[in-house]
Image (cartoon, rainbow, N blue to C red):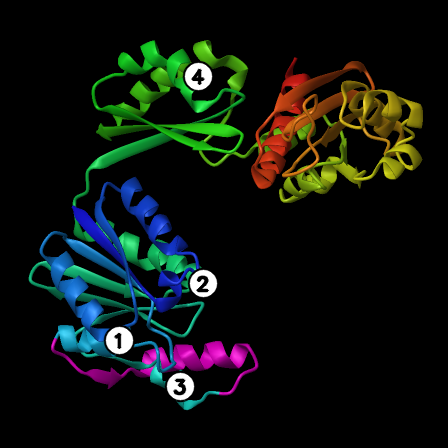
Amino acid sequence: MNADIVSIGDELLIGQVVNTNSSWIARQLNLIGIKVNKIVTIGDTRQEILETLKESSANSNIIFITGGLGPTSDDITKPVLCEYFNTSLRFDEEVFSMVDQFVSKRGGTMNELNRGQAMVPVSAKIIKNKIGTAPGLWFEKGGVIYISMPGVPFEMEAMMMESILPLIKDQFQLPFIFHKTILTTGIPESKLAITIEKWEKQLSEGIQLAYLPSPGMVRLRLSGFGNETIKSTISAEIDKLKMILGNAIYGYDSDTMEIVVGNLLKSCNKTLATAESCTGGNVARLITSVPGSSDYFRGSIVAYSNEIKTNQLKVPIDLINNNGSVSKEVVEFMAINLLDILNCDYSIAISGIAGPTGGTIEKPVGMVWIAVASKDKNVVSEKFLFGDNRDRNITRASVAALNLLRIYIQE
C-alpha cells in the first residue's frame, strides 16, 4: 500500500500557517505499513486540485486530502471534489444534527454557513467530525481511495485515529512494521555515527537505522519489517547499543528529557528548583510542561541580572567581579545557595552568553556554565560551547542542564 498526502490552502503556501498535518499523517501511515510516495501542498484553486488528484491517482492506492472543507467562500474543496467524482451535493440530516449540536454547545446560533456544512457529496461515505463542523469524506474511484479531511489539525487527527485508520486496517491486509526510537544526548551526530559504526554495520537484515538530530540530542530510529519476531530482534540490538553508549541514552520513543528527569525525582521522592540566567526560565518551563510536576518542582529564580544574582541568590559581588557572571565559581554558588533559598533537594544553576552579542575572545557567544547541587552530594559543574545561534543555545543549554541533573541523580 502506498499513499499521497495533499494539503490544500493558500495560507500554507505563503508561510502564514505551518503545515503540520502532512508530517503527522505521514507518521501515522508509516506506523501501519503504508508507504508515502509524495507530499504535496497546493493553493485553493480548482485547477490545481483537479490536476493534483489526477496525477496522484496514477501512482497511489490512497490519497489523503486536508483543507478547504470549511463554511466560507474560499473553501472550495467540496465543490471541486463533486466535479472530480461527477457527483452533486445533498443535504444530510445526521450531519446537520451534529453541526447544530456543536454550535449550540458553544453558545452559537445556526446560520446558513453552518447549515452548508451538512451539504455533502452524494457519492461520498461520510466520516463523522465529533469536534468540529466539517465532516470527512471518503470516495472510491478506479481502485483508488480518496479521503478528504478538515485542515484544522486537532479535528483531522481525531478523525484519523477514531475512524479512518481503523477503516483502512479493516479493509486492507497491511505489512507488519515496528519502530523503536533511542534518544541520545551529549554526543554530536557525526561523532555518534563513528562511535556506533561497527554496531550499525552488523544490524540484522530487515532492520533500518535513521539518524534524527535536533538541538541537544540525536534520535536513533530502528525500523523493522516482517513479522512480530522483529520486535525481539530490535530489542537485542538495543541491548548491544546500551553497552556502547551507556548514559548517552536517556530514553525511548516519546520520552522527553523533562519527563525522564521528573520520573527520577518522583522515584526518589526528591524536589528540584532552578536558578537561570541565559535560559530565562526555559528549564522551568520544560519541567512544568509535564503534568504532575508540582509534586517535585519547587520553583525558579530567573537571575538575568547580576543584581538578582547578588540580592536573591546571595552570590558575593566580589565573586562576580573576579570571575565574571559566566563562570564555574558563580554557577556553583548559585546552585548551592538555591538549595536553602527554595528548600529543595536538588538544584540547577545556569549562566551563559546566549548571543548573538556579548561574547569576548575568552568567553565567546555560546559559552554556558551549568551546575547541579544537592544537600547530600557535592556540587558538580560543566562548561559548554554551543555556537552562535541564540535560540539553539537556549534549547541546548536547557537540555544539557536537565541531562547533567539526570546523570547526577543516577550516579
> Which is nearer the eye, 98 or 144?
144
> Earlier along the polypeptide chain: callout 2 or callout 1?
2
* Up/down of 379 relative to 398, above or below: above
Locate residue 97 relative to residue 396 in the image: left or right: left
Res 131 → quadrant: bottom left
x%, y% of residue 376? 81, 15
Instruction: Please check the rendered image and state whether residue 64 is part of the magenta-colored stretch, yes or no.
Output: no
Circle 1: element type: helix
Mark 4, residue position: 191
Residue at position x 41%, y 74% from top? 133
Give the Cα separation between the discs numbered 3 and 4.
Answer: 57 Å
Q: Going from the N terminus, do you reach mark 3 or mark 4 first?
A: 3
Mark toward the viewer: 2 or 1: 2
The amino acid type of the residue labelled 2 equals Gln
Toward the front, the furthest residue is 361
- Check disc 3 and give the amino acid type: Leu
**Image x and y of residue 6, in percent:** 26, 59
What residue is shown at x 77% (from left), y 19% (from top)? 328
Disc with the residue nearer the chain's start (3 vs 2): 2
**Which residue position is annotated with label 3?**
113
Element under disc 2 = loop
Give the side of residue 342 with respect to residue 399, left or right.
right
Which-is-in-front pick, marks 1 and 4? 4
- Magenta stretch: give its range: 86-109
Disc nearer the start of the sequence (4/2): 2
Q: Is residue 90 magenta?
A: yes
Three-letter amino acid code at the position of disc 1 = Lys
Residue 196: x, y in percent? 38, 14
Name which quarter of the figure residue 88 lies in: bottom left
Q: Is there any visible trace of residue 363 in the rendered image?
A: yes
Q: Which mark is residue 16?
A: 2
Q: Earlier in the sequence, mark 1 or mark 3?
A: 1
